[in-house]
Image (cartoon, coloured by chain):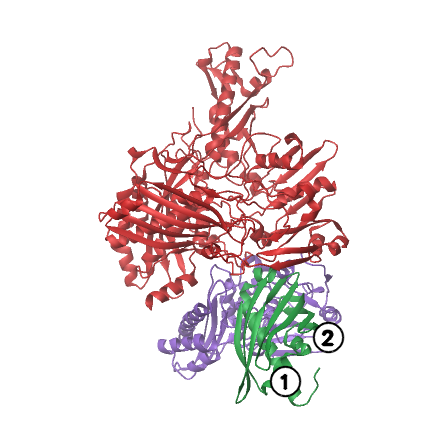
Amino acid sequence: MKPAPFVYFRPASLDEALAHLAEVEGAKVLAGGQSLVPAMNFRIAQPAALVDINRVAGLSSIEARADGGLRIGGLVRHRALETSAEVARHAPLVAEAMPLVAHPPIRTRGTLGGSLAHADPAAELPAVMLALDATFTAVNRMRARTIAAADFFLGLYATALEPDEILTDIAIPPLPRGAGWAIDEFARRHGDYALAGAAAILVTDDRGTCTAARIGLMSAHDRPVLAAQAAARLVGHRLSPEALADAADTAAAVDADPSGDIHASADYRRHLVGVMVRRVLARAAARASGARP
Amino acid sequence: MASYIGERVRRNEDARLLTGRALFVDDVQLPGMAHVAFLRSDHAHGRLRGVDVEDARRYPGVIAVFTAADLGDFWQPGPLLVPPPPVPGLEFHARTQVPLARDKVRHVGEPIAMVVAESRYVAEDALALIAVDVEPLGAVGDLEAALLPDAPKVHDELASNLAARVRQQKGDYDRARADADLVVSRRFVYDRGASAAIENRAVAAAWDPKSEELTIWDTTQAPIPIRNGLARLLGLLESQVNVIAPFVGGGFGPKIMMFYPEEVLVPWAARRLGRPLKWTEDRHENFGATTQERSQVHDAEIALTREGRILGVRDVFLHDNGAYNAYGLTVPINSQCTLLGMYRVPNYESEFKAVFTTRTQVTPVRGAGRQHGVFVMERLLDLAARELGIDRLELRRRNLLSPDEFPHNHEIIFQDFAPLTYDSGDYLPAFDEAAALIGYDRFYREEQPRLRAEGRRVGLGIVGYVEGTGIGPYEGARVTVEPSGLVRVATGVGTQGQGHFTAFAQLVADALGVDVEQVRVVTGDTREFHWGTGTFASRGAVVAGTACRSAALAVRDKVVALAARLLDAAPETIELEGGRARGRGRDDASLSLGELAARANPLRGAVTPGMEPGLEATAYFGPDRGNTANGVHAMIVEVDPETADVKILRYVVVHDCGRLINPLIVEGQIQGGVAHGIGNAFYEQLHYNEDGQLLNASLMDYLLPVATDVPDVEMAHRETPSPFNPSGLKGVGEAGCIATGALFAQAVEDALGHAVEIRGIPLSPDRLFHLMREARA
Amino acid sequence: MKVTGTFLFRGPREAVWDLLQDPAVLAKAMPGAERLERTEGDRFEGSMKVSLGPVTAARFTLVVELADKAAPERFAMRIDSQGPLGFTRGKALVELTPVDEGTMMSYSSDLQIGGRIAAVGQRVIDMAARMMTEKGLESLQKELDARLAGGSRA
């Protein structure tokens, strides 16, 4: 389990990093390396070159924005998200998700941008960003562009990111008044890839009617997905246990299209999606009602 | 005099281990050392038509590439390590592993070519340049299909994939069955697992052309047999070959003395190339290259009276050997013998067929087949209890062997070739103590009804087992008192974390009246001790420990004789304490052991006839037969009916391994064993597909239980001494993991109100989900 | 691994049949196939380079053989690929049935996947097979559209 030969660049600036990406065929960005390096050791990944961005300045800050949202640099470590007071205040769903992300050693090294760009269908952060309706900034040598989370995840490990782009920023909009949130997952052991999981934001008006719902699913599809049909069944309704159960059933039956593997057959996984969505919605709804004035 | 036996002495070796100052094989770095990697089969079964290594040989940094064709006469199948036991009518076909595949590949991970290069990186680069031409043949996995006439044959020259057939019986089961009020029969399945030691295997070797000595560092559990075997293979004197098994990060069986391909090829190539070489198995390789255990399919039945008295048991099972069977029949014989457990079974009929499959070879892994037997028996008892309407704990009580039935001869042959004879035991109090600790009565009276009313699914399991331990043939030890006063103990067994440096020191310290920290134990180095076998079968403390004690007692005699002479006292009045010898009642005159050692090795004056220089003695211990430890495990679990997850709420072990040397070490063994058992029961499974591919050859997908999955085990010790050795010891190495599968099954069934019946291990949430869904349908 | 399914081609059966016998087209339908050349009769050899998420630039040799042909109804395809990461081999059966909307293709393949891909990729292998099948079928339809529109055959 030793990697194949590769060329290693360690640029000090974003411009330099982008230049390497543009110029070297088959170059990959090395951020935290928690998925890429094991894949290289197995030699299933044999990138011609690595562009190590760990010394690139300006990608590691967490900033609260005037509107109550957050701007998070692509190189922010999971551990920084986990311990940030700004994240806890402005994006409590992210704070709640962090202890579920792998193990402390991995969180110490792994980055938000890296997790999103890797786009593992079982990962927490892509599902969380879908639920939060986050926007990503991707930069190449010529320009910067923004991509909504909902447009970012295109397939199995496939994203809208081009090979010459670096994901530099993640913008999380402010939580509306009356919003509740929750994340849960079922994994064989703490820190494993979830067999199924869900992250949700529910927004209610003063009368307790759901005005918006976004539910990100883990391990429910070949990519991180929103449970759009389930969410649609909640909007305009009061969040009764029956309504939540109905939405959970919809998420499992309609939104999810899981595959089977040795840990969970497809039918078991589909069942778990329903269980996780129901549990998450119940907690999010309770928080939403608590959040109402 | 205070005794160390039974004391919670902190481990002498831990300071070195915990501060990273212990030598492991991968730490061995020698000038000019080159590195080895192996090309392994991607195919489960195929005819090897060609191996083209020319591109690899030309790759910069590659020193040599070897295929089977390059090995010449050195290419030969490995030794049959354990011949079949003398059971009448036994059929056995030995086929042992080969150093590099020549005509056929027989499992994924089997080595085909060996690359030696300046670094492991370069060696792995070169592997990618080797072209292998394999004509695929059908994989053999399903044990029943493997024996059908049209099955592909793993070994072409054999009539079939049958590796062995063994039938053992006691009494007359058919008659017992005819007399029975109830017969319960079922099929039980136990699937494969890995040993997953924290340290993978590693071999380093250096040939010194001037001293003509070959030194090998090896993660083996049995350095002396490896030394002897390699000397024979390489045409060297045993004294020219040194095998050092330094600290080893877990053995669990697969490191015993396999003469693995890597273990014979690395020393051979080091000598041939004149370069020190090292190969360290990576985790991915480990999943195909290191031996595994477990697949068995049992068709079993039990016959009882309506009062719940066992009349007999019949068990017919298939055992998965993997592609080779160098370790003989140890694992299935253990299953066959351990099934009888703590119970009085007057009639027993057991027949197994061992089957060659296109999977990695099976050899003992902690438990070594015992858990299969326990699973079958305990499941049968659970089912019978339900059918008879007898409480399952009560049913067990009615059938336990009583203390006056020992030694108890079960009349069948055990893995040590002797009739299966339990030395001693007292089982009923063990069951009662476990039931009391887990709160059996209160659980059913109060807890389970209350929690069930809250919608929670909690269940209890309680299961007993025996563990045959401490088998021969023998071990030896040499004890030396040095002039510094330090006591040196050398023994031939290797150590893989068992606490030998402490337990052996305690036995020796007691015999010589010295502080336990003054006793320095050396294990696993053939330069230090020449005779012995190894650490396996829960035998280290019993066999090597007793040898250490005997040698120490012989040294004691020398100390006493010399002290008596020098102190002018009668030998029977000499007392040894605090590292000094003194005459009773003569506190003014004493000599330290160090002074005595110096006096025993004088620079002037003759060693008189009949005397030996120094304070040193060597002793051996070879028990006639093994001894039988026992235990009862109890557990409370909660099942989440929605996710089908299982959480362990409590875990209790009442254990009896005879006289305890060091409860701290015994508890560590049990806690670790339980972790291993929980893994086997609920997390770990080697998933082979029908093509013989292992689908989870990484620790990403092969799920070892982690700290959050293993509870702190609540333990109680009972001590029924063994009459087979002077200290009354029995082994404990495998105790923790033997009962766990049966325990999980019983507790989970109980939690689910017996809506499901569990006949297979390992369980998983997915499997449980489907069982629950079938039960509802 | 078994992959079975149906796919509706918007085009007549003969056109679909011709499409599926053309190595250049087959190469396009196999994600990552770099080239595929007829070596003799219905045997084609080439190479492929698979990139999928963390798997980058994994190289495989590729041999495809068509057999049991009953034009324009059905044929079998034997696939054999290997490389340092392992191998894929097996057989696919393809049947074409004319339907009102075009041609219904039903396919069933039984593939052995071995080596490192099988050993460490189990979590995504089903998803990957599904995705690669979908991609392949989409590109076949595109090629068919182009042909029916009189476009390039390349």
> Residue at horizontal 34%, vertical 36%?
B425
Mark 1 neighbour density, 10 Å: few (under 14) some (14–19) many (20 or more): many
Q: What is the drawing colour of chain C? A: green
> What is the residue that sits farthest to the left in this orientation?
B307
Q: Measuring from the top left, give residue A215's x and y in whole percent.
A: 48, 75
Q: What is the drawing colour of chain A? A: purple
Q: Secondary structure at mark 1?
A: helix
Residue with the mark numbered 2: A141
Query: Marks 2 and 1: in contact by CB < 8 Å?
Result: no
Q: Measuring from the top left, give residue B105's x and y in whole percent.
A: 60, 53
- The amino acid type found where label 2 is placed reads Arg
Q: Quadrant of the C terminus of chain B?
A: bottom left
As drawn, is B207 to the left or to the right of B727? right
Mark 2 neighbour density, 10 Å: few (under 14) some (14–19) many (20 or more): some
Query: Mark 1 falls within which chain?
Result: C
Q: Measuring from the top left, give residue C100's x and y in whole percent.
A: 52, 89
Q: Nearer the viewer, residue B668 or B59?
A: B59
- The amino acid type found where label 1 is placed reads Leu
Chain ID for red? B
Q: Secondary structure at mark 2?
A: loop
> Residue at horizontal 35%, vertical 35%?
B409
Residue with the mark numbered 1: C144
Above/below status of A198 relative to A37: below
- In space, the residues marked 1 and 2 are separated at their CA atoms by 38 Å
Q: Measuring from the top left, give residue A77's x and y in whole percent.
A: 59, 64
Q: Nearer the viewer, residue C105 or A71?
A: C105
As drawn, is B257 to the left or to the right of A185? right
Q: Is residue A104 visible?
A: yes
Q: Comparing marks 1 and 2, which lies closer to the viewer? A: 1
As drawn, is B661 to the left or to the right of C75? left
